[in-house]
Image (cartoon, rainbow, N blue to C red):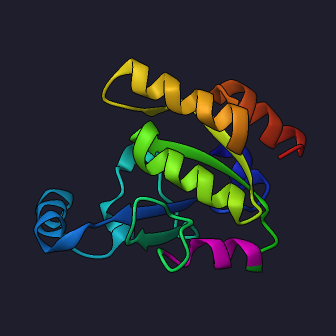
Amino acid sequence: MGCSRLRSTPPRRHTEFFGDEIAEVFRNSGGEGPISGRVWAGLSPQAEDLYFEKSTYSAFFPGSSELPSVLRSRGIDTIFITATLTNICCESSARDANASGFRVIFIADGTAARRDQDHNAALHNIYRTFGDVRPTNEAIALLCSGQA
């Protein structure tokens, strides 16, 4: 995140809730208060960071969150995807982001699935069709060089 901050591009984060029962599980395990206060401290959240809630697997599905419109309003056309699960939320977001005109850079070692075969299959799908798949060090180099 150092290069992101140097380029004055605050990181975007989102949370997800699927129905009342699952939402209650997340609320009870994730703490109370604003989303920004529930982010793991190891990520070094900053006051200028932006947070979004999403209502579907994909953060880029139309109507799921405000993320796509905020990115567009800031002139951002390239996204980096890191999270879990590779083959569910991450792949869904990559597909919808690509279909919405965003350049997708999917971080292979910054995503995970329950099984290696699921993770690898999703990486293959993304690489062949929806975006670029890179390890963290290459993605950081792209960001710092201004190529992303």
Q: Position of residue 40 (x, y in %)?
A: 34, 50
Q: Is residue 126 above or below residue 22?
A: above
Q: Is residue 81 above or below residue 142?
A: below
Asked which quadrant contains residue 114, the reply is top left
Q: Is residue 83 left or right of residue 137?
A: left
**Front residue of 68 and 101:** 101
Magenta stretch: dominant secondary structure = helix
Residue at 17%, 67% in the rendered image: 27
Q: Position of residue 137 (x, y in %)?
A: 69, 25
Q: Position of residue 30 (x, y in %)?
A: 21, 59
**Front residue of 65 and 44:** 65
Q: Residue furthest top?
A: 116
Residue at 41%, 59% in the rendered image: 57
Asked which quadrant contains residue 141, the reply is top right
Q: Is residue 128 left or right of residue 65?
A: right
Residue at 19%, 61% in the rendered image: 26
Asked which quadrant contains residue 101, the reply is bottom right
Q: Is residue 138 above or below residue 73?
A: above
- The stretch of residues the image draws in magenta is 65-72
Q: How many marks?
A: 0
Residue at 58%, 46% in the rendered image: 81
- Quarter of the picture containing the N terminus is top right
Q: Position of residue 133 (x, y in %)?
A: 68, 32
